[in-house]
């Protein structure tokens, strides 16, 4: 190819985009030699390919349906007293009992409270499962754990019975320690501009509510929590002693988790007036209005719990991968991928037996995988399912390049430029329909919390999008330049 033809080819926006993304992907992957003299990259590997552990936790709670002729609020309050646990109303006839009580025993409690139990499912609501997920993610992130994943397993009925925690790079004992660790929560009061005094610790907080708008519909978010009688007395005495009730603006209350400040605000005028008269057990931490205030309220709920989950869980399953076994799986995955590339190359060579067609086709296919890895490095761990998705993308990618090539060489010779563009457009149309079908087929897996299957779907969708947007159009331009010679 002449120099001016090569410059014109590289200057084409489709080819230029391919080259730019390819260079950025190599930088993103970051191949290098580490301190131990071993080849390394920036790619994140899942539990299958490195040392790590996973825990599957089962919720010790139940979602039940009920019927009652009593006011629902009174009925639920009686259930709370008899069961000595939180009971959350989920709908007109459904509640969440945050304690695992056998159905037969629960039926007796319902009957004593003036109601009837109609349905019984072990697990929690999706909202509670999401709260648990957020708490666990916050916990593992605050402890500096890398490559951690938390997935809730929710059924078609919207009830979650299990949650799976995957921690790469840690042993089983470390994983159990991380999941079971609670932080130290403390409330302090500002005595001067730079000084604070201790008020109480988190063990005096008996319950924590979910973020709500107070008053309802006002747009102002907050988190309610309840103190024990001893905690309420300590709170009132400290507020009066240090002037928080008479001069709230200069004596803010501060909340700390493991000595890190997570919330600071003065007492409201209404609460300050109440505390001067008597202890108050029911408190509300306001965070303001808007999306940022809601996020702050959600985080504050986690902090108030000090890492404690709203429902008890027990380990229903666990497993670990040793460092040696992870390296073995990684090496076998690399070998499998190399064999897949060689197999695809041999099939394409057998079909065309023309280096000018086979080499660009394989080069584009491998470039697509490199770009896919460069993008996936930021959003997805690579485990065995993800490797399988890479091989699937490799196969479907070469299949679509064959469609383009065969469509162009329909009559066994290179067509004129106008006819070439028509055939290329028709081939890309076929590929677009095929890609859309693959994406729609993978979307349910990508949107559902199905652990490794979700990674398979995400890698497949990314590969299809990269192919349709970047590599297929660039291949069409490159093969046109080559075949015209």
Image: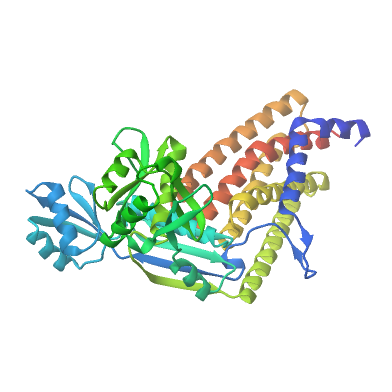
Residue 230 in view: yes
Percent x, y of residue 396: 62, 48
Whether residue 327 is situated above or below residue 73 in the rendered picture: below
Percent x, y of residue 412: 75, 37
Colour basis: rainbow
Q: Residue at x 78, y 60 (%)?
A: 32
- Give whichever of 473, 56 is nearer the camera: 56
Would you say 319 lies left or right of 110 here?
A: right
Q: Which residue sits furthest top?
A: 418
Would you say 46 lies left or right of 299 here?
A: right
Q: Residue at x 45, y 63 (%)?
A: 184
Q: Residue at x 9, y 50 (%)?
A: 68
Would you say 230 lies left or right of 172 here?
A: left
Whether residue 424 is situated above or below residue 99 in the rendered picture: above
Q: Give residue 313's quadrant in the image.
A: bottom left
Whether residue 169 is situated above or below residue 138 in the rendered picture: below
Percent x, y of residue 276: 28, 47
Q: Residue at x 81, y 36 (%)?
A: 483
Quadrant containing the N terminus in the rendered view? top right
Residue 150 in view: no
Percent x, y of residue 460: 57, 49
- Give whichever of 339, 137 is nearer the camera: 137
Q: Give residue 86's quadrant in the image.
A: bottom left
- Badge count: 0
Quadrant containing the C terminus in the rendered view? top right
- Give whichever of 232, 151 is nearer the camera: 232
Would you say 289 lies left or right of 96 here?
A: right
């Amino acid at each position: 190819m002449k120099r001016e033809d090569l410059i014109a080819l590289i200057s084409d926006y489709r080819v230029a985009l391919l080259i730019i993304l390819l260079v950025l992907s190599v930088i993103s992957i970051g191949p290098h030699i580490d301190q131990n003299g071993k080849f390394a990259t920036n790619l994140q590997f899942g539990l299958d390919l490195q040392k790590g552990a996973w825990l599957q936790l089962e919720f010790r709670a139940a979602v039940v349906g009920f019927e009652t002729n009593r006011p629902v609020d009174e009925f639920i309050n009686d259930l709370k007293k008899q069961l000595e646990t939180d009971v959350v109303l989920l709908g007109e006839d459904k509640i969440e009992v945050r304690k695992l009580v056998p159905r037969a025993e629960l039926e007796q409690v319902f009957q004593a409270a003036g109601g009837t139990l109609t349905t019984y499912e072990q697990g929690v609501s999706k909202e509670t499962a999401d709260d648990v997920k957020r708490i666990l993610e916050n916990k593992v992130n605050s402890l500096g754990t890398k490559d951690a994943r938390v997935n809730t397993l929710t059924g078609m009925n919207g009830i979650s019975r299990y949650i799976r925690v995957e921690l790469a790079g840690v042993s089983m004992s470390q994983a159990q320690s991380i999941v079971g660790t609670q932080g130290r929560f403390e409330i302090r009061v500002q005595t001067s501009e730079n000084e604070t005094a201790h008020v109480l610790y988190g063990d005096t907080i008996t319950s924590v509510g979910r973020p709500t708008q107070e008053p309802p519909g006002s747009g102002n978010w907050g988190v309610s929590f309840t103190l024990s009688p001893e905690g309420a007395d300590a709170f009132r005495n400290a507020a009066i002693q240090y002037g928080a009730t008479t001069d709230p603006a200069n004596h803010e209350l501060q909340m700390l988790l493991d000595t890190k400040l997570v919330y600071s605000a003065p007492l409201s005028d209404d609460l300050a007036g109440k505390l001067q008269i008597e202890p108050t057990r029911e408190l509300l931490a306001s965070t303001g209005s808007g999306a940022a205030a809601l996020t702050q309220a959600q985080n504050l709920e986690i902090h108030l719990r000090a890492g404690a989950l709203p429902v008890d869980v027990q380990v229903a399953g666990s497993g670990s991968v040793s460092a040696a076994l992870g390296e073995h799986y990684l090496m076998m995955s690399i070998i499998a991928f190399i064999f897949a590339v060689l197999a695809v190359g041999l099939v394409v060579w057998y079909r065309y037996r023309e280096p000018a067609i086979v080499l660009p086709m394989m080069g584009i296919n491998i470039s697509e995988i490199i770009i896919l890895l460069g993008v996936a490095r930021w959003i997805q761990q690579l485990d065995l399912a993800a490797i399988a998705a890479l091989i699937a993308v490799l196969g479907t990618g070469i299949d679509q390049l064959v469609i383009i090539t065969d469509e162009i060489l329909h009559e066994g010779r290179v067509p004129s430029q106008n006819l070439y563009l028509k055939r290329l457009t028709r081939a890309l149309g076929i590929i677009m329909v095929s890609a859309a079908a693959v994406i729609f087929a993978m979307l349910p897996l990508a949107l559902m919390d199905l652990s490794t299957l979700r990674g398979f779907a995400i890698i497949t969708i990314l590969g299809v999008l990269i192919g349709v947007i970047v590599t297929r159009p660039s291949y069409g331009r490159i093969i046109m330049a080559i075949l015209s010679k």
